[in-house]
Amino acid sequence: MYIAIMGHGVVGSGVAEVISKNNSLIVKHNNLDSLEVKHILDLREFPDSPYKDKFTKDFNDIINDEDVKIVVETMGGLNPAYKFVKACLEAGKSVVTSNKELVAAHGYELLKIAGEKNINFLFEASVGGGIPVIRPISRCMAANEITRIAGILNGTTNFILTKMITENMSLEDALKLAQDNGYAEKDPTNDIEGFDACRKICILASLCFGRHVYPDDIPTQGITKITLADVEYAKNYGKVIKLLGTAMRSPDEKVCAEVSPALIDSTGPLANVNDVFNAVLVDGNAVGEVVFYGKGAGKLPTASAVVADVIDCAVSKGTKIGYTWGEAAENNLVSSSEMLTRLYVRGFASDIEKAKENIKDKFAGAEFITRENAPENEIAFITPSDIKRKLIKDIEEIGNFDSQSVIRLF
Amino acid sequence: MYIAIMGHGVVGSGVAEVISKNNSLIVKHNNLDSLEVKHILDLREFPDSPYKDKFTKDFNDIINDEDVKIVVETMGGLNPAYKFVKACLEAGKSVVTSNKELVAAHGYELLKIAGEKNINFLFEASVGGGIPVIRPISRCMAANEITRIAGILNGTTNFILTKMITENMSLEDALKLAQDNGYAEKDPTNDIEGFDACRKICILASLCFGRHVYPDDIPTQGITKITLADVEYAKNYGKVIKLLGTAMRSPDEKVCAEVSPALIDSTGPLANVNDVFNAVLVDGNAVGEVVFYGKGAGKLPTASAVVADVIDCAVSKGTKIGYTWGEAAENNLVSSSEMLTRLYVRGFASDIEKAKENIKDKFAGAEFITRENAPENEIAFITPSDIKRKLIKDIEEIGNFDSQSVIRLF
């Protein structure tokens, strides 16, 4: 079986490496005749690569090669990945990608083409890197109605938050450390503003709830507003702050998805997911809570997920085996503002006692939290459960109180 | 698609319930024409069951029914489960089972028959209850050479240990509480002596390393010797005690498997798996550590795993899709006594100072641990890393020291 790889960056070169390194094991375990990389598409030169005789700069070498039945896309970005992937599928070649941006933007359309051609469009590596997530959700939980998904989907931000929580490091210092370690890019916007996590929760929500969810429709907030004060208050309330992508069914069968920081129980299964590790929690109506945990990024972990998809394509000999979902529908989504939640609130008051009275007036059952050495005029509390929109309005209206941080409880 | 269920106990009745409750979702998501339970085999009477017109006491009603292409076995035990399952497979019917005893004892033979008939013998529910473990390992990690597996595979013992660790409850009281909550049977031997975990690690080891591993060949030790003193010492050393099933490749490519308590890092991914939850850690040469976590038992979680396998059989229309492994081979296994490890040791000495000197003489680099209010003549320490057999011999030979607990570090 011949494959082609488009893009020889971190993940793409990892795919070539895993296929080469574990070749005999892969062929034997999966009863394949062979598995061989025939073309690697990249505009750059790799004169020292062990695959140097396989490189091409011309996409036509791949699309016109009848021998190539499976194409791996690890270029990243939308262009030209979208055009190339679509052309491959239309030419009857199964495609495996690690490109979450592509799947979040065009998953429905590409799955539809694959379905019509009875071939596969697989993207296990697009969420959770090497952690098996997509396939376990789609196949092993086929017997469940999924009610909720929540994930720590971005290793960079989880590394930064872990340093803030366990070492009291400032966000700036932790980001700098992440960059020094190669966990964060020079321009860390995609990670720290939550855009990367947003694409991943869109893919998971589409898969679990059956209709494409587009990133632009999902409220997305990163970690840049989180302070060490918030981390400390959370801790004193038995919680840790994590950047969560969440998606759940609302009572009226719509989907509510968002990416934002959340206070989670420090004894729960997601609380101890630290450093660059990712985890995805799935709640099914029969199985209950299931969590998948592992390295969410990195060359070989991500490559191993890509290769597993390639093997699935090879084993199924081109016949459609994967998942699918429908086009996005109007009114399929409901804003998280309309859902019940509790909020953590921290802010300042010129007259502490008066502000506390005002808070108690607005929120019967508000729980105040303290921390050592807090500024004299600082107040932090947890609201009772109510519709988020109403809570936000009430917080704004608290007399004599200037809120600085508002974070949801999960 | 018609199926039959053999055994209407906790899991079997759960399978009928999940298929009934989620029927429209299952049929739609998986493009099936229908999925219907046609026969339920049980010797008992269920006059109030919603499935009461489907019961039979005669296995021939199932084996002779050409309409039934998939048979679920949830009877448990080896007899008559083994005979019935074998007959079904030989008759060309795919079989799905939750019966870990059956798979651990006869997995190789039954997989072989299924392979010859080009049908499926699937058993996702036999390990980790509802947690997708078997399929993610076999398919999603197809690209990896697996180097190590470690699992908290038994919910009953994990519940007991959690109570000992977090509430300082004695083993006897915790067992009583587990029984009162329905987590432990009246005769808890299979759980607390590690036999249940042993069957599961055998299934995982067979799957990961390619040859059947039989329970009789695996050293198995339960939790009955663990005391609150050990729990406390472990805590003071930054560890928690868990009952682990482990299997790994030895340097000479053999398999080393065992079930026994182990001290694990309190910050690691298995340490916070509490109560009746299970978790399986898999280490692959490309993906690194991956952990699957969830409820390891219970009616609906286990049933949901069974139904997922049923769906896989239905979707694949009888064609073999599952995993397989070879027969056990002589010299495939290596005893854990021959592997490197560190040990936690607790014991008593009439002359503490003399005993400590003797321990230091035997074990250069031994780390002593203390606990509050320990008996005056109690000593606890961690050995350096060495071959386990040698460590055990050296511990026995420590002059003036009577060892009470010896637990491996993981």
Image (cartoon, coloured by chain):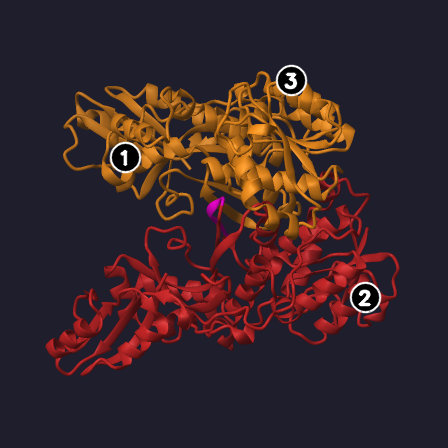
Chain colours: A orange, B red
Mark 1 in CB contact with mark 3 (< 8 angstroms): no
Q: Residue B126 in the image: state x and y as whole percent.
A: 60, 61
Residue A407, by quadrant, is: top left
**Viewer-nearest residue: A88 or A140:** A88
Q: CA distance from mark 1 to mark 3?
A: 41 Å
Is residue A341 found inside the magenta-colored segment of the image? Answer: no
Chain at tag 2: B
Residue B59 x/y as whole percent:
81, 70
Calculate the distance from the C-alpha at mark 2 to the C-alpha at mark 1. Answer: 60 Å
Q: Nearer the viewer, residue B325 or A208?
A: B325
Q: Are marks 1 and 3 on the same chain?
A: yes
Question: Element at badge 3?
Answer: helix
Q: Is residue B343 above or below residue A30?
A: below
- Does residue A372 appear in this view? yes
Q: Secondary structure at mark 2?
A: helix
Determine which residue is flagged by label 3. A83
Q: Is residue A248 visible?
A: no
Left or right of B317, for residue A52: left
Can you give x and y, in whole percent of width and height, for residue A292 in the image?
50, 45
Residue at point 25%, 36% (across, down): A232
Q: Quadrant of the C terminus of chain B?
A: bottom left
What is the chain letter for disc 3?
A
Numbered range of the magenta stretch: B286-293
Q: Chain of mark 1?
A: A
Q: Which residue is mark 1?
A: A164
Of residues B13 and B311, the one drawn nearer to the viewer in this rendering: B311
Determine whether the residue tagged by mark 1 lies in a helix, strand or loop: helix
Q: Earlier in the sequence, mark 1 or mark 3?
A: 3
Q: Is residue B385 left or right of residue B140?
A: left
Within 10 Å of disc 3 (Cα), the crowding (few <14, some 14-19, many 20+) is few
